[in-house]
Image: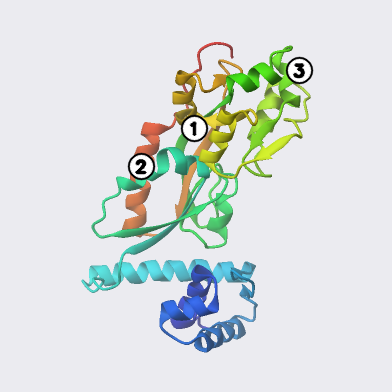
Amino acid sequence: MEELPFDQVRTLLAVIDEGTFDAAAAALHVTPSAVSQRVKTLERRTGRVLLTRTKPVRPTESGQVVVRYARRLAALERDALTDLGLAGGAGPTRLPIAVNADSLATWFLPALTRVPQDPPIRFELHREDEAHTAALLRDGQVMAAVTSAAEPVAGCTARPLGLARYLPVASPPFAARHLSGGPLERLLPEAPVIVFDRRDELQDRFVRALVSGAPGASRFRHSVPTSEGFCDAVTAGLGWGLVPEPQAGPLLRSGALAELAPGRCVDVPLYWQQWKLDVPALALVARTVAAAAADSLYPLEHPAPRPGRT
């Protein structure tokens, strides 16, 4: 039975994390040729291609298996060194986490500030849509994720965080120009709309719920791939959109935004998934994030009703 030498596994992980062979060599304090040789030797041992030689480098399906194994080994090694009192020079614990943009812009970063930093933890955040963050767990890029997937990824645990609430809003001038000549059910599917990116289906979901049989929101779409920019684009009057309640609330109160369908909203369930690892830093972050989510999100079991039309 072939073994997987730790130096080769660690090198593969460095290449994935750093993105190139040269950057991995600098991080490991070896030459690029040494990095290349270790990866090739590991590929010969496994009989599989483990990396796609692109920029940045990406793991193949077999490489994802080895990367997950490498992250587990690295975490266990750090814990062992800590227990032995030998981890002082190892630097902060590195925790790669996938999180969606709207959580980043509202409640997640304040949650990380609550995490005790003794011993220190270095966060490496990967921004991805909540419907796709679980994929980063599968391929070994992250150790934990905020996701809309309730079913745990293989080798992971999942716990509910709560419901993120989105409100359908537009600027008053936009609403007067595009949505005042008839019933909302007829006008909204044709009005210009803001989406995060091509994978953003939230506005389509709202229109389908509002109008039975509708194919979705307008084909006239402005794509704005940041949470803050999305909110700014709606406020500026480029289109209507579903804005997280924490962002929409102050703008509604000031009159900069208007609700399009009072009493209606879209609630997106969020879960915390993480690898099944006995890593104290990961457990600490999980507890802190869950507590912050309880303060910021609606409970999944009994979400608060919205006043007005339902």
Q: Residue 170's spot in the image, x, y percent?
A: 60, 24
Helix, strand or loop status at disc 1:
strand
Q: Look at the image and name its color scheme.
A: rainbow
Quadrant for the C terminus, please.
top right
**What is the CA distance from the residue labelled 1 to the residue labelled 3?**
29 Å
Whether tag 3 and tag 2 are in contact, CB under 8 A, the answer is no
Inspect the image, locate mark 2, and give the three-letter code of the amino acid beneath it: Pro
Residue 10 in the image, given as x and y percentages of width and height: 46, 76
Picture coordinates of residue 294, whole percent (x, y): 38, 34
Q: Which mark is residue 110?
A: 2
* Residue on which the image places disc 3: 186
Say which quarter of the image contains residue 178. top right
Name the quadrant containing residue 54.
bottom right
Q: Secondary structure at mark 2?
A: helix
Q: Residue at x 56, y 19 (%)?
A: 258
Q: Nearer the viewer, mark 2 or mark 1?
A: 2
Rendered image: mark on residue 163: 1
* Count of residue discs: 3
Q: Secondary structure at mark 3?
A: helix
Question: Could you tell me the amino acid type at mark 3?
Answer: Arg
Earlier along the polypeptide chain: callout 3 or callout 2? Answer: 2
Q: Is residue 160 visible?
A: no
* Residue at 45% in and 20% down: 254
Q: Quadrant of the N terminus?
A: bottom right
